[in-house]
Image (cartoon, grey):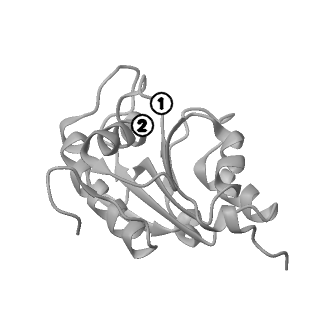
Amino acid sequence: MARERPEIARKALLLGLGNPLWGDDGAGSEAVRLFRRLYRYPDTLQVVDGGTLGIGLVAWLGSVAAAVILDAAIGPGSPGTVLDLPCRRLARTRWLRLSEHEVGLDDVVALATWCGRLPRRLRVVGIVAARLAPGVGLSEPVRQALPQALDVTSRWLRRWGVAVWRKDGPPE
């Protein structure tokens, strides 16, 4: 097994996914914007709005030792339910695909695994979508779930040694 490069081992990634022009599919992108506004974090944490990059996300995942991905999901649970999943559960959870030609999060993780570019630590924080249709803006249940999704995200990052905390409070 190849040794990890030290400069990669020190980095973590917070990656928001989704298309903000397709209703609740933009939840991951909006969560990243909210995280940037509400949280303090070190330079070793890359905070990226991955939008709909698809296969291009494999390079982002391969550049870090730990990652949290924020995305919209289709169940289980009612709209606004926050899901906290290890990557091995992705195959059993439905992630959004707007067409049969689109690359899904499960495809990206499978390819990153196959290429040996999956971070050692990977969590997916999903928010169950209520509205998936053309249009800008999140549904109310998804918008209300954003703070909870960021709480889950920040707990994972702190567990992995990344110093993140809300700007309106003391370091936790």
The residue located at (74%, 64%) in the rendering is 113
The residue located at (62%, 66%) in the rendering is 65
Q: Is residue 77 visible?
A: no
The residue located at (23%, 57%) in the rendering is 148
Q: Which residue is mark 2?
A: 29
**Percent x, y of residue 120:** 63, 72
- Side (left or right) of 99 relative to 81: right
Q: Residues within 10 Å of mark 2 (few under 14, many from 20)?
A: many
| Residue 150, numbered circle | none
Which quadrant, please, contains the C terminus? bottom left
**Percent x, y of residue 146:** 26, 47
Q: CA distance from mark 2 to mark 1?
A: 8 Å
Q: Amino acid at mark 1?
A: Asn
| Residue contact at pointers 2 and 1, CB within 8 angstroms | yes
- Side (left or right) of 92 relative to 40: right
Q: Which is nearer the eye, 131 or 163?
A: 163
- Seen as rendered, the residue at the extreme left is 169
Q: Which residue is mark 1?
A: 19
Q: Is residue 35 visible?
A: yes
Vertical side of 149 occupied by 113: above or below: below
